[in-house]
Image (cartoon, helix red, strand yellow):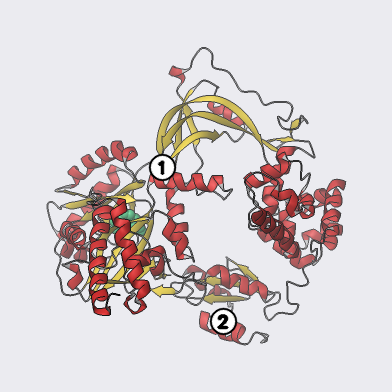
């Protein structure tokens, strides 16, 4: 047995060693030991910490695997507001920025630091005497979320600093958490395989991964972090941004090595041209460059506008474009029967992912752009948008190029495909079209609808292929035995899936209404309808006038609901669901006569005690309605720090205004108070 003193010494030694190797591997990209040797050090440390629990510490490298899940993130008020940058989109705007800077400083020439603008999630991190204490998201700039636990799992975030910054009693830095292009693609591939929804782009993936309540999930995502700013430091003076980056790197932070110092704005413009060429070959997505006055006292002199510093600007690149070829144009049938043409492309890498199809929206657009099968085309992907074909390169059109014709029959079920007058889209008229069925089941089970865990697109495909479901109601008749017989399905997951399906029977009426997929009835409208009618039967029997009397229901929505309930097969489907025991009334959900019954509440500004969604749900649970805009129909405005135009409008209209605290005291602590 090793003595406690000895253990304590060895634990320190191991932590020091691991920290050094983490730094070499994650920050400098130049490991000195093999993965096996590294794992051995980690194991030894973990074993000692287990044997001597009193030696455990939140700063130990073993803590990177993530601790216990949280119920919610707590809010953090930033000690300094986290501002954002003004954008410049062309040389003209940059020259304007430079002119303003030089004239304010009274200087001929100003040196600028040019850094890639990584497309991720901004975080502020606080260290005390070199130890990581607090990490927060930007939030609204004033108040962010405490994501300390999750940031601990990001390997390039040092838990303990080296000199010189370890000497600062308090240090606050700002950086960007992001996911590399390759890591992003891999994550999405895994999600595709397990039927989970895909992330639209690396930024969303990074945000989704960092804002996980369970840090163990974050720990499994290969997040990275570049630090680019010293926000606050005690006991050290830093003269320039170049020096700041140098000091950050020396102290253990991962700093982007691509930052370059330019002696004038002309040099910056030249560098931008270089960057536009280099951008696709980087391992991570950047959406522009950040140009900062290098001299920090000068930056301070320039000061801030209400939203951004005057000493820096973000130069945004245009959407990334690439050239590829249209291999085919196919049509896809959606849940509403819309038949949408889609271009199948020769795969090409653009803006962070490989693109192999592009939606063509409708036939008119294909005609207008004159896109033919065989054409070379320019495609564009702007951030999170679905790739689109910008234009054809007619000079490259081969003889064999073929025009697209909309099929007369649905490729899935053979029913007629018809374009209704006034509509741009064609629709399949088949009521039991398998493509519509697939999409309608996926929608039925989705999160905002019946929220059936584990029933994603690939499972739905399996159920359809096995002939186990012919409509959404058939889901409720599935047995664990039937499900277990599907490929890649064990007994336990089969039981879990069946239990999840059964559990969805008691979802509130609003979700069921939404889940039915009535055209033009989204989640909000479904909630309004559930509240107004209380039961599915009442909704089914409502006439046009009654429907129109529901706030927010206009003629288009009303007609869509009427035509839905006119279809006999829809009425039969609802009966079938009822016979399986699916709940058809709202009674259980809405406390009649809740303290906010019939009241419309608007939240504006930052909330500190609860998230916005949570607050809105609270209002609904008390019989009220949360809205995002202030009008004469608003009954109450809850205003937090940073509230602006909505608050002003509420004052103008004489609407009662409360702080979050007052709202909480009035309605949450004494939920029976009636205003
Ligand atoms: S400096 C006052 N440097 O771009 C804001 N920002 O609006 C100072 N970003 O929210 C930001 N890379 O999340 C700075 N090298 C970099 C950056 C960077 C990415 C993000 C940051 C900020 C946004 C600018």
Q: Which residue is mark 2?
A: 663
Q: For label 1, count other residues whose C-alpha is less than 10 Å away and answer few (under 14), some (14-19) or many (20+).
A: many
Q: Secondary structure at mark 2?
A: helix
Q: Nearer the viewer, residue 193 or 347?
A: 193
Quadrant of the picture in which ligand 1 is shown:
bottom left
Sort mark 2 into few (<14), some (14-19) or many (20+) by Cα contacts within 10 Å.
some
Q: Are marks 2 and 1 in contact (CB under 8 Å)?
A: no
Residue at 46% across, 53% down: 204
Q: Which mark is residue 102?
A: none
Is 359 left, or right, of 218 in this rendering?
Answer: right
Name the quadrant of the N terminus.
bottom left
Left or right for 55, reference 647: left
Q: Give the numbered dot on residue 352.
A: 1
User: At 63% from the left edge and 46% from the top edge, which residue is drawn?
Assistant: 457
> In the rendered image, is residue 430 in sight?
yes
Closer to the camera, 127 or 290? Answer: 127
Measured as percent of width and height from the top left, residue 208 is found at: 47, 57
Relative image position of residue 449 (x, y in whole percent): 68, 57
């Amino acid at each position: 047995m090793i003595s406690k003193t000895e253990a304590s010494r060895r634990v320190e030694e191991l932590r020091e060693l691991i920290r050094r190797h983490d730094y070499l591997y994650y920050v400098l990209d130049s490991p000195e030991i093999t993965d096996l040797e590294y794992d051995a050090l980690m194991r030894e440390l973990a074993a000692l910490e287990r044997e001597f629990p009193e030696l455990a510490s939140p700063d130990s490298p073993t803590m990177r695997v993530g601790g216990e899940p949280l119920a919610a993130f707590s809010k953090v008020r930033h000690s300094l507001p986290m501002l954002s940058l003004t954008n410049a989109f062309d040389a003209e705007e940059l020259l304007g920025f430079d002119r303003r800077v030089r004239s304010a400083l009274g200087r001929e020439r100003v040196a600028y630091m040019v850094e890639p603008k990584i497309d991720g999630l901004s975080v502020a991190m606080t260290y005390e005497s070199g130890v990581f204490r607090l990490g927060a998201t930007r939030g609204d700039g004033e108040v962010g979320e405490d994501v300390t636990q999750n940031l601990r799992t990001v390997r390039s975030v040092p838990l303990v600093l080296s000199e010189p910054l370890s000497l600062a009693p308090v240090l606050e830095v700002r950086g960007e958490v992001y996911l590399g292009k390759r890591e992003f693609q891999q994550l999405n591939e895994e999600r595709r395989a397990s039927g989970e929804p895909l992330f639209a782009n690396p930024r969303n993936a990074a945000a989704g991964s960092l804002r996980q309540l369970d840090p163990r999930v974050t720990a499994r995502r290969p997040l990275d972090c570049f630090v680019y700013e010293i926000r606050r430091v005690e006991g050290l003076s830093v003269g320039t941004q170049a020096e700041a980056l140098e000091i950050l790197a020396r102290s253990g932070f991962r700093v982007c090595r691509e930052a370059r110092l330019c002696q004038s704005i002309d040099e910056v413009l030249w560098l931008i041209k270089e960057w536009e060429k280099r951008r696709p070959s980087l391992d991570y997505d950047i959406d522009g460059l950040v140009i900062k006055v290098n001299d920090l006292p000068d930056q301070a002199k320039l000061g801030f506008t209400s939203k951004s510093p005057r000493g820096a600007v973000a130069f945004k690149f245009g959407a990334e474009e690439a050239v590829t070829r249209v291999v085919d144009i196919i049509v896809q049938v959606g849940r509403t029967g819309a038949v949408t043409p889609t271009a199948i492309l020769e795969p090409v890498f653009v803006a962070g992912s490989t693109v192999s199809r592009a939606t063509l929206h409708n036939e008119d657009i294909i005609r207008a752009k004159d896109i033919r099968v065989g054409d070379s085309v320019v495609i564009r992907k702007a951030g999170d948008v679905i790739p689109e074909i910008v234009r054809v390169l007619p000079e490259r059109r081969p003889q064999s190029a073929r025009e697209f014709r909309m099929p007369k029959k649905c490729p899935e079920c053979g029913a007629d495909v018809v374009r209704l007058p006034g509509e741009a889209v064609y629709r399949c008229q088949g009521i039991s079209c398998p493509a519509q069925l697939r999409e309608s089941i996926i929608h039925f089970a989705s999160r905002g609808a019946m929220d059936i865990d584990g029933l994603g697109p690939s499972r739905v495909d399996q159920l359809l292929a096995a002939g186990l479901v012919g409509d959404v109601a058939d889901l409720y008749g599935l047995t664990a035995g039937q499900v277990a017989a599907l490929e890649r399905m064990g007994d336990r997951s089969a039981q879990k899936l069946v239990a999840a399906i059964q559990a969805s029977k008691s979802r509130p009426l609003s979700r069921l209404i939404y889940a039915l997929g009535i055209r033009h009835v989204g989640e909000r409208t479904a909630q309004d309808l559930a509240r107004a009618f209380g039961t599915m039967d009442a909704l089914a029997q409502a006439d046009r006038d009654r429907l129109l009397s529901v706030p927010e229901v206009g003629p288009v929505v009303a007609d869509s609901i009427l035509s839905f309930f006119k279809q006999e097969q829809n009425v039969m489907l609802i009966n079938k669901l009822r016979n399986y025991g699916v709940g058809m009334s709202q009674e259980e959900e809405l406390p009649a006569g809740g303290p906010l019954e019939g009241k419309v509440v608007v939240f504006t500004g930052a909330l500190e005690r609860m998230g916005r969604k949570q607050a809105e749900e609270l209002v609904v649970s008390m019989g009220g309605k949360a809205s995002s805009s202030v009008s004469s129909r608003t009954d109450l405005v809850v205003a937090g720090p940073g509230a602006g135009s909505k608050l002003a409008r509420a004052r103008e209209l004489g609407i009662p205004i409360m702080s979050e605290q007052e709202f909480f005291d009035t309605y949450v602590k004494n939920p029976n108070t009636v205003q």
